[in-house]
Image (spheres, rainbow, N blue to C red):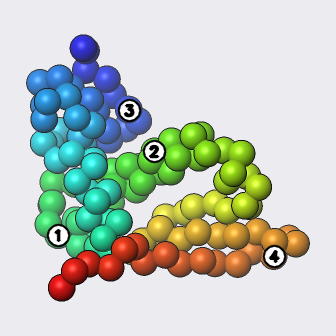
Amino acid sequence: MKRSEIGKHLVVDPKVCHGKLTFKGTRVPVSTVLTFLSMGDSIDSILRNWPELSREAVEEAIRWTADLIHEKYKTKTARMGKVARVNSARIEYMQVKDETVHALKWPGPRRNR
């Protein structure tokens, strides 16, 4: 397997993290960051914990993942009329109904305390 660059900030390199998708120039797996985001951490929190990452890199990972999900479930997503966008803190879903955009915020699953 050869090194594959995915976008500007993501890379799959068999010599880094056993070939997992990581942020370019780091050993930080994209899946780890996405897991923390899904548990409710903000992008700001991610950047404090991994200062080697940039906001642009994290947002690219979110967009890349959203694109993969959209491709896999494109018929269902298109019927539901939802699109994801990234703001400074979390992913927001916008639902379009009758030419009106409704914001649907999903904070992610709750953590066990």
Say which amino acid is labelled 2: Trp
Q: Residue at x 45, y 45 (%)?
A: 64
Reply above or below: 29 against 50: above
Answer yes or no: is residue 71 visible: yes
- Please give the label number shown on residue 14: none
Q: Residue at x 38, y 49 (%)?
A: 61
> In screen coordinates, is 27 left or right of 90?
left
Alpha-carbon span between mark 3 and mark 2: 9 Å
Residues at circles 4 and 1 in contact by the CB criterion of under 8 Å: no
| Residue found farthest to the front | 112
Say which amino acid is labelled 1: Arg
Which structural element holds mark 1?
Answer: helix
Which structural element holds mark 3?
Answer: strand
Alpha-carbon span between mark 1 and mark 3: 24 Å
| Location of residue 71 by image quarter | top right
Residue bearing the label numbered 1:
48
- Please give the label number shown on residue 100: 4
Reply above or below: 109 against 52: below
Alpha-carbon span between mark 1 and mark 2: 22 Å
Say which amino acid is labelled 3: Ile
Residue bearing the label numbered 2:
64
